[in-house]
Image (tube, helix red, strand yellow):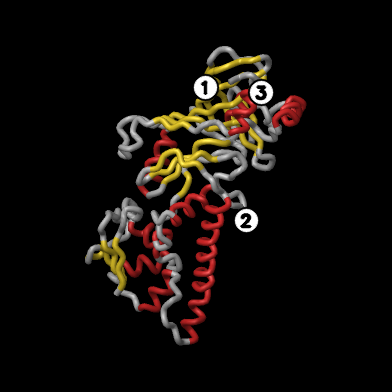
Amino acid sequence: MQSVTIGKNQAGQRMDKFLHKYLPNAGTGFLYKMLRKKNIVLNGKKAEGKEMLAEGDEIRFFFSEETFAMFTGNTTGNINTVSHVAAMEPQKQKANSTENKYKEYDIAYQRLQPIEILLETEDVLIVNKPAGILTQKAEVKDISLNEWLIGYLLQSRQLSKEDLQTFRPSVCNRLDRNTSGIVLCGKSLKGSQVLSRLIKERSIGKFYRTICMGSLTKAATLDGYLSKDHATNRVTLQKQMDRAAKQESDYIQTRYTPIQTKDQYTLLEVELITGKTHQIRAHLASIGHPLIGDYKYGKRSANEVLKKQFGLEHQLLHAYRVEFPQGLELTDLAGKMVIADYPKQFEKILQGLKLA
């Protein structure tokens, strides 16, 4: 008989969902058969699998050691027969793959240093992402902030390799590779769930800073419908929804407030009311005020001048501030405001354009 006690990062999910993570090599049909036959029990009683797990719950497995090792992917058991060795070979490969994952987390932690930590609680980590770093992988070979996060938690002993078997911390909001600034990360299951819910409900105030082309002197709110072409990774905007269009469109809303205007440039604070791919970049470009450095939606000739003057090769966009609502169950975040200072290049351009 084997058993596992549910910790805080496993609590709050259905039992069958947990079992799929804990026994990754077992099929759904097998798991429900074991539940029906009481070979898997919850707190000493028969379970259906739809129960919500609580911290301190105990799940027992009445399996042989070989069966348990095979379904968990743990190949350390003493397996002697040819049939068992053959059955375990995929699990050995999986174990090697898992070990490579741990190395990947360590490599990401070392290579992406230093990442500035703006706020850390028991459940949440808020960091200031530099431009040029992916928030999440686009391809298998990529290294992203997501791997850095797990590497950081492993290095600081806030997370163990065993924890990763059933829970994987992750970033909760995405920034484009070349957009810098605030990224919210869930360290615990509770933190991930709360942050994801707040983002979905648009309960977190998200404010960006950018410099755009042209002079803007009054605050305004923009809205429209955004469609994405996945082949070109570009978005287009329409004022009204085009119901005849082949691509689906999403309603978007962007609010901006000018901070400083000088000659043909404006320092803006932009509140992202909705959050869609390239929303700020496309919305400001649609009214004739593209972000400086934005070759996808902006003016190449103007960007080339700034590239020569400041070395700017990408859109200048910085996730500057987040504001959390009151009354959160994560009480150490309730009512808090977090600010990420401008990157050095942003500061240099502000000084050079006399917008500081």
Which residue has dot 1 on it?
255
**Residue 168: quarter of image:** bottom left
Q: Secondary structure at mark 3?
A: helix
Which residue has dot 2 on it?
141
Residue 202: x and y, percent?
43, 32
Residue 237: x and y, percent?
62, 27
Q: Identify which residue is drawn at 45% across, 70% down.
A: 73
Q: Where's the C terminus, which quadrant?
A: top right
> What's under tag 2, amino acid-wise?
Lys
Residue 128: x and y, percent?
51, 39
Which residue has dot 3 on it?
352
Q: Secondary structure at mark 2?
A: loop
Q: Secondary structure at mark 1?
A: strand
Q: Identify which residue is drawn at 50% across, 69% down.
A: 95
Looking at the image, is mark 3 or mark 2 nearer the viewer?
3
Q: Identify which residue is drawn at 52% across, 76% down.
A: 89
Q: Are marks 3 and 1 in contact (CB under 8 Å)?
A: no
* Classed neighbour count for the residue bearing mark 3: other residues with Cα under 10 Å, few (<14), some (14–19), many (≥20): few
Looking at the image, is mark 3 or mark 1 nearer the viewer?
3
Q: Which circle's residue, 2 or 1, is located before the other in the chain?
A: 2
* Classed neighbour count for the residue bearing mark 1: other residues with Cα under 10 Å, few (<14), some (14–19), many (≥20): some
- Whole-angstrom CA distance, mark 2 to mark 1, is 37 Å
Q: Which circle's residue, 3 or 2, is located before the other in the chain?
A: 2
Looking at the image, is mark 2 or mark 1 nearer the viewer?
2
